[in-house]
Image (cartoon, helix red, strand yellow):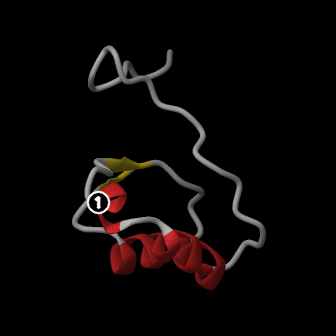
Amino acid sequence: MPTPPRRPRRAARVLDMVEGRCKQAFKQWLAQREESWRETVEVVAMDGFTGFKSATTEELPPTRSR
C-alpha cells in the first residue's frame, strides 16, 4: 500500500531523471535548482546508494530521507 501524500492536494511525483549513478551527478543536479525550490523539499525518497544520500545532505536544507 503506497504512503499517502503528506498534503492531500500535493501528491508525490517524479521531478526529473538524472543521468549517471554517482554522487557528483545528483549533487550537480540539486545545485542547479533554485534555492527557493530546494527549501521546499520536505522528503527525499531515493535509491540506497550512499552517494545520493551524501549529495542530498550537502545540497539541501535538513530533510528526511526515506
Q: Which residue is mark 1?
A: 36
Q: Is 58 located above or below residue 34 in the figure?
A: below
Give residue 60's quadrant in the image.
bottom left
Residue at 47% across, 48% down: 45
Disc 1: CA contacts within 10 A as few (<14), some (14-19) or many (>=20): few
* Camera-nearest residue between 33 and 11: 33
Residue lying at the far bottom in this picture: please name it.
Answer: 24
Q: Residue 1's spot in the image, x, y percent?
A: 50, 15
Total marks shown come to 1
Quadrant housing residue 5: top left
Could you tell me if residue 8 is visible in this image? Answer: yes
Residue located 35% across and 56% down the image: 37
Residue that sits furthest to the right in the current view: 19
Q: Position of residue 39 (x, y in %)?
A: 26, 59
The three-letter code of the residue at mark 1 reads Ser
**Image position, residue 59 (x, y; %):** 38, 76
Residue 50 at least partly seen: no
Left or right placement of residue 64 versus residue 66 in this view: left
Where disc 1 sits, the SS reads helix
Residue 54 higher or lower than 3, as above or below = below
Q: Is residue 4 left or right of residue 39?
A: right
State whether residue 55 is above or below residue 15: below
**Which residue lies at the image location 28% right of the left edge and 26% below the top edge?**
6
Q: Position of residue 53 (x, y in %)?
A: 45, 70
Residue at 54% over, 54% down? 46
Reply above or below: 55 against 17.
below
In screen coordinates, is 26 left or right of 64?
right
